[in-house]
Image: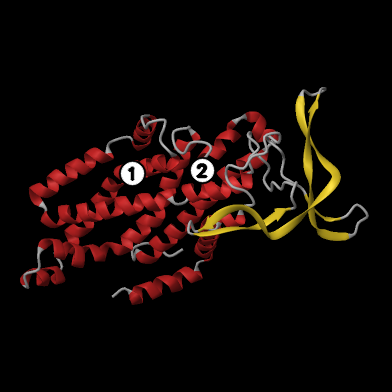
Amino acid sequence: MFNKADNTLIKKLKKDKLALLGIFVLSFLYLTILFASFIAPYSSTFAVRNLSYAPPSKVFTVTSDYKLSRPYTYNYIREFNPESYSVDYKLDRSKKYYVRFFTKGEPYKILGIIPSDRHLFGVENGGNIFLLGTDIKGRDNFSRLLFGGQISLTIGFLALFISFPIGMLYGGISGYFGGKIDSLMMRFAEAIMSIPSFYLLIILAAVLPAGMSSIQRFSMITAILAFIGWAGFARVIRGMVLSIKEQEFVEASRSIGAGSLRIITKHILPQTLSYVIVAITLSVPGYILAESGLSFLGLGIQQPDASWGNMLKEAQEYVNILYRPWLLTPGLLIFIAVLSFNLVGDTIRDILDPKSNTR
């Protein structure tokens, strides 16, 4: 019953250049993090301790006598500058390290299943390539960005898979039965909505046991986000159900003896899918920002595991912003991901809402 509507939605999305740009960017980001282990030259914990805050590696394609060459790079030498009391990095031009594609490296599992040790690119043994420099512990920022994106970009969808089914069913039951049941259920939902969400996240994340693994902490944060996110969605669904339940096809279902739960799940809630699609695309950015904010404050994903939030924490220092701008890359990616979701969500809302003005 939704094939015609789906085709119309796809056709109109194709005509909107901003929406297409958002879809392309999001597709690229999610494909990148899906194959992060293959694309990243190193694991998220690989570190060269004596290369703390090393600048991005310079990749050369021309030799010193101006002849074309295979891509190569040099290692960095760390030196202390007694005049400025700072650490400087200079290229060790005594040996070239050629860039290799589909090279062997640290073992991993493709999609967590298939074992492999092939990486998209790397350098010869003894060399290092850091496309976005290193962090304070000498870990490759480029590799950690890819692995951090697996957490930052998926936590929103995982939270939605919990909160949206709860919100849909809760709002559907409340709106369908009405009366005292509706009143009691909505008062409870409003109580949940009145809780300051960000402060609740800070409190609950702070009381999590320090010995929890990152997977356990990730699961807990997802559950917390879902717990505070379903009530507002349920209230909107309830309002839609109040009008839908008076339509003829619902009365027809009642007349043939269909049960209340079947009517709600099979006939009424599917009529709200247009709003649900829009709500999903506009809600994911909020979850991404919530996780990044918690990790930035040190209450989310903990080191040594990476997320864009805890990686961005290093960029809060004034010196790093001035002299190590590559540390701001996680913030840029958060901005791009959130903007792309909003572009796609706004376009879908304009298409599916007949009362909105076309752009």
Labels 2 and 1 touching (C-beta < 8 A): no
Q: Residues within 10 Å of mark 1 (few under 14, many from 20)?
A: some
Q: Residues within 10 Å of mark 2 (few under 14, many from 20)?
A: many
Point out residue 155 in the picture as x, y percentages from the top left corner.
42, 48
For the residue pair 170 and 219, the one nearer the viewer reads as 219
Whichever of callouts 2 and 1 sits on the residue coming sooner in the sequence is: 1
Name the residue rendered at 30%, 43% in the picture. Answer: 227
Q: Position of residue 180 (x, y in %)?
A: 8, 47
Helix, strand, or loop for circle 2?
loop
Residue at the (44%, 40%) spot, across then down: 214
How many numbered callouts?
A: 2
Quarter holding residue 54: top right
Q: CA distance from mark 2 to mark 1?
A: 18 Å
Q: Compare residues 152 and 172 and report the one nearer the observer.
A: 152
Residue 223 image label: 1
Q: Considering the image in quadrants, where does the N terminus appear?
A: bottom left
**Whole-percent x, y for residue 283 in the image:** 39, 51
Which disc number belongs to residue 254?
none
Give the residue type at disc 2. Ser
Say whether residue 106 is left or right of residue 302: right
What's under tag 1, amino acid-wise?
Ala
Q: Percent from the top left, x then y, of residue 40?
A: 61, 52
Q: Nearer the viewer, residue 191 or 296?
A: 296
Residue beneath label 2, please? Answer: 307
Taking 328 as reference, is 280 left or right? left
Residue 245 visible in image: no
